[in-house]
Image (tube, rainbow, N blue to C red):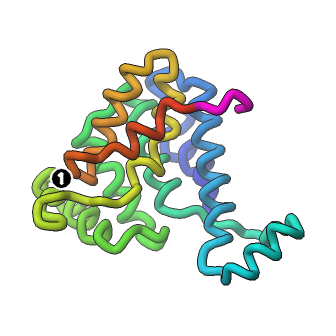
Amino acid sequence: MRNPLVAIRLAWHHRWVFAVPAAALDSLRGLALGDAFGDTWFLRPAGEVEQLIAQQAVAEGPWPWTDDTAMAISLFHLLSTRGRVVQEELAMLLADAYDADPYRKYGPSMHGVLEAIHDGEPWREVTTRQFGGQGSWGNGAAMRVAPLGAWFATDLDLVAEQARLSARAPDAHPGKRGGVAATPYRHPAV
């Protein structure tokens, strides 16, 4: 199992173009841990889950991370090299991450979308073919956006603008709000 943060360091050779806000890196680390931990609870019978929670039991490792972390790493990479969301580049980074490791529990429709983008089809054309032109109705935008919210935390208008751009690639649904809604909130205890 590859550590996503090691993958980041290896991919960028410890050189970022833009200074990485500590909160954004912390957010990515938290997202990866939460993703891997949360995935240990999927597909368990409800009774077993309730019992394990009551016992405060934690699954033994390894805890593999999913597509949510893979996509968050791609978004983080884009922010660290461009300082903002560039939709075409984000779509290609997401497609490249998929191509490198397609077994991270991507949603059924995303396999075809990301393969087509990786093969060179324009992301807007690919994504708008989904579901009769409606684009994806999945939760990918919300699941990958946490580092973006932390990156631009001092300017919530910029957070919302960048989250909207992030949510459209590769999901394309014009009403996509999950990524935008998920970004500005930060619990006071965090």
Of residues 74 and 145, the one nearer the viewer is 145
**Any part of residue 145 in sight:** yes
Pointer 1: what residue? 123
Residue at horizontal 42 percent and vertical 38 percent from the top? 181
Residue at the farthest top position:
154
Relative to 139, is 146 above or below? above
Residue 172 in picture, x, y percent from top left: 22, 50
Q: Is the magenta stretch mostly helix, strand or loop?
A: loop
The picture quadrant where one finds residue 113 is bottom left
Q: Which of 163 and 188 is in front in this view?
A: 188
Q: Please indicate whether residue 187 sits to the left or right of residue 96 in the image.
A: right
Magenta-span inclusion, residue 117: no
Q: Which of 164 and 17 is in front in this view?
A: 164
Provide residue 107's location: percent of width, then percent of height: 38, 69
Q: Give the range drawn in magenta.
A: 186-190
Q: In the image, is 44 to the left or to the right of 171?
A: right
Judged from this view, the residue extending furthest toward the right is 55
62 in relation to 182, above or below? below
Residue under the image location 38 percent in, 37 percent down: 180
Label 1 packing within 10 angstroms: few (<14), some (14-19), many (20+)? many
